[in-house]
Image: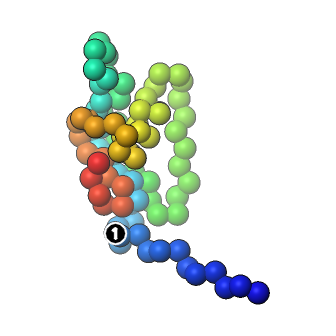
C-alpha cells in the first residue's frame, strides 16, 4: 500500500483563505460596474458558493480572485496575497 504525502501547507496561517472588501470592477466601455462594493470572506475548511442571477458578477469575481482580470477597486486577497 502506498502512502500519500500530506498536502502542502498554504503560505499564510490566517483563518481567512479568501478576503474581499469593497471589491469593484467595471469592464472597459461598460456603463455599469460588473461588481460593485462586494464584501465576503471564506475561512479555512469552509464550503462557499456563488449564487445569483445572470449578470450578477459571479464569474467576474472569480476571474478577479484568480488574477485573470486586473484593475479592480477595493481589496481581494487569497491566502493573504493581494490580487
User: Considering depth in this image, is 78 or 42 the residue closer to the camera?
Assistant: 78
Q: Secondary structure at mark 1?
A: loop
Along the viewing direction, whichever of 59 and 39 lies nearer the viewer = 59
Q: Position of residue 77 (x, y in %)?
A: 31, 52
Image vertical order of residue 55 relative to residue 14, above or below: above
Callout 1 crowding tier (Cα within 10 Å): few <14, some 14–19, many ≥20: few
- Give residue 34's quadrant in the image: top left
Display coloring? rainbow
Q: Residue at x 24, y 35 (%)?
A: 71
Q: Residue at x 23, y 40 (%)?
A: 74
Residue under the image location 39 percent in, 66 percent down? 15
69 relative to 36, above or below: below
Q: Position of residue 52 (x, y in %)?
A: 53, 29
Please state the horizontal and vertical placement of residue 80, each as a whole percent of the image: 30, 60
Q: Quadrant of the N terminus?
A: bottom right
Residue at 56 percent of width and 54 percent of height:
47
**Left or right of 65 in this view: 31:** left
**Residue extending farthest front:** 2
Give the percent coordinates (x, y) of residue 13: 35, 72
Number of numbered discs on residues: 1
Residue linked to disc 1: 12
Q: Which residue lies most toward the right here? A: 1
Amino acid at each position: 500500500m502506498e502512502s500519500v504525502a500530506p498536502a502542502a501547507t498554504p503560505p499564510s496561517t490566517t483563518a481567512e483563505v479568501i478576503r474581499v472588501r469593497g471589491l469593484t470592477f467595471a469592464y472597459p466601455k461598460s456603463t455599469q460596474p460588473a461588481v460593485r462594493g462586494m464584501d465576503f470572506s471564506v475561512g479555512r475548511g469552509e464550503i462557499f458558493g456563488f449564487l445569483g442571477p445572470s449578470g450578477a458578477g459571479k464569474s467576474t469575481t472569480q476571474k478577479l480572485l484568480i488574477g485573470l482580470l486586473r484593475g479592480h477597486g477595493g481589496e481581494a486577497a487569497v491566502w493573504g496575497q493581494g490580487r
